[in-house]
Amino acid sequence: MVSEKKKRIFPKNFLWGAATSAHQVEGNNKLSDWWAWEKAGNTAESGRACAKYELYDHDFSLAAELGHNSHRLSIEWSRLQRPDGSWDNSEWDHYKKVLSSLTAKGIKPVLTLNHFTLPKYIARQGAWLNRNIIDSFSSFAEKTASILGGMAEFWITINEPNMLAEMAYLKGEFPPCRRDYKESLTVLAHMAEAHAGAYEAIKSALDGNAKVGAAKALTAFHPCRKNNLFDMLAVKKTRWLRNHSFINSLMEGRLTIPGMPEKILKTKKSLDFIGINYYLRQFVRWQGFGGRKSFGKTCPYQHHPESGDITDMGWEVYPEGLYEVIKEMMRYRRPVMITENGIATDDDRRRVEFIRLHLKSAAKALSEGMPLIGYLHWSLLDNFEWTHGYSKKFGLVEVDFKSLDRKIKPSGWYFADIIKKGTF
């Protein structure tokens, strides 16, 4: 008989769970820049979302039923700090109850400070383009650590800084809807400085008793034309800008973002772990020399012979890419946690297969000795998916947005079985 130890692929202390973000699930986030943008008619409205603000305990019970031992969530800055700088103690009490609900069920919180949204008054002051946000965010991190510090071991300062810089300041699809390449790089630099300040504040407030990281959107980049030297160069430059420059800046303690002047950050090696949000592969084609052109352009999937299954978000399912990006991060000699990985689909059978294949890639990384400490699926619940409204289904749990009833999907039970056995 094969022993239980030999059967198990994932270690018993592995962090298993799912992820959510405040604006996407809480509902009635009325004091944020996103809510104001929605009300101005720019995109779908989040409204009451999943009403997780009220139903958090029920949702965490579902997570516990599925065997989750960790859960990533964000707190909403705009609920907690008023325009005059004062704090709303009732909202701090609310988040204390939220974290207490998790720990009472044996679920470790992975606490995110910023998941895209900002207080309206911060947005009016210039949001991430205004250098003042660096100190404001550090103060918010320090306050959070002083109030909630003993309730969470793992902290994430900023979610997907590169994606926010791209979507909000380059493509103009997220508020404040800017379309300026230089501004997007400035924003990325300010977020690196803000992270470094927040890292120092959290570690100081908690006497070092916290593991602080950032959740980075990583993409598997491949050349559009295989073995074409120019496409391979474009891939190299794109991979550096989008996968590495932010993380490298934090580890070096100085800005290493292309196109930005070098600047010393508050601290070196300000990552105790690296959070990986992985969803897709992209093919890159050479555009030319100079500025933004050097990073190439993305080839449409339909024009590439190697592209595979496409999700409802228009992203290619490429499970091998999860292994590739984990391996990329090994240069920084830090533990890594999969902080988001999921598929938008109405066909839950596709989600089962997505989970199976991506966890095979995670298992491969573990078998080669890579320090992977956890896997958090995106998402626990079907939720508000930013500019896509409620049309994209990522959840392990189905939500009826009229009745707010929840129903665990077969993929949720499939994932639970892997968690229980530690293998497929």
Image: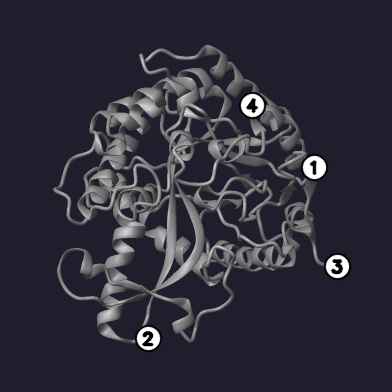
User: In the drawing, what numbered circle is on residue 226?
Assistant: 2
What is the secondary structure assignment of the residue under circle 1?
helix
Residue linked to disc 3: 1
Position of 103 with respect to 155 (left or right) is right
| Mark 2 or 3, nearer chain start | 3
Q: Quadrant of residue 114?
A: top left
> For the residue marked with disc 3, what is the amino acid?
Met
| Mark 3 or 4, nearer chain start | 3
Query: Cα distance, mark 2 to mark 4?
Result: 49 Å
What's the residue at 34%, 37% (across, down)? 195
What is the secondary structure assignment of the residue under circle 3?
loop
What is the secondary structure assignment of the residue under circle 2?
loop
> Can you say whether 4 is above or below 86 in the image?
below
- Report the front residue among 225 and 126: 126
Residue linked to disc 4: 98
* Residue 340 point in image, percent of width and height: 55, 52
Residue linked to disc 1: 65
> For the residue marked with disc 2, what is the amino acid?
Lys
What is the secondary structure assignment of the residue under circle 4?
helix
Q: Residues within 10 Å of mark 4 (few under 14, many from 20)?
A: many
Residue sticking out furthest to the right: 1
* Residue 279 point in image, percent of width and height: 52, 61
> For the residue marked with disc 4, what is the amino acid?
Val
> For the residue marked with disc 1, what is the amino acid?
Glu
What's the residue at 25%, 43% (across, down)? 253
| Mark 2 or 4, nearer chain start | 4
Query: Cα distance, mark 1 to mark 3?
Result: 30 Å
| Mark 2 or 1, nearer chain start | 1
Position of 405 with respect to 389 (left or right) is right
